Amino acid sequence: MKNEGEAVIIGRIVKGGVAEKSGLLHEGDEILEINGVEIRGMTINDVCDLMVCINDSVLTSLVFFQLISLNK
């Protein structure tokens, strides 16, 4: 993950990981919300702390924004 202004962006996808296998998340996608917690404006450290807390329970929702190029 990385910050771009207020946005939290997926920086890379781990090969063989859940995100790659699902095909839903891609590099450059913006994470908007995790388990009902708005992410915009958080630092990467804040998001990582949130993910550590979720690791002890269950990830119930991940909302993200994906840019789609119409020039493909």
Image (cartoon, rainbow, N blue to C red):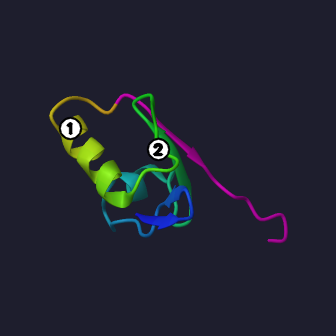
Residues rendered magenta in the picture: 60-72
Q: Position of residue 48 (x, y in %)?
A: 28, 52
Secondary structure beneath dot 1 equals helix
Task: State yes or no: residue 65 in magenta.
Answer: yes
Quarter of image, res 54: top left
Give the alpha-carbon distance from disc 2 to disc 1, as whole Å. Answer: 14 Å
Residue position marked by numbered label 2 in the rendering: 39
Dominant SS type (magenta): loop
29 relative position to 16: left or right: right
What is the three-letter code of the residue carrying label 2? Answer: Ile
Q: Position of residue 23 (x, y in %)?
A: 49, 54
Q: Position of residue 1 (x, y in %)?
A: 40, 63
18 and 1: which one is in front?
1
What is the three-letter code of the residue carrying label 1? Answer: Cys
Q: Is residue 15 above or below residue 39?
A: below
Secondary structure beneath dot 2 equals loop
Q: Determine the residue positioned at 50% across, 61% down.
A: 9
* Disc number for residue 53: 1
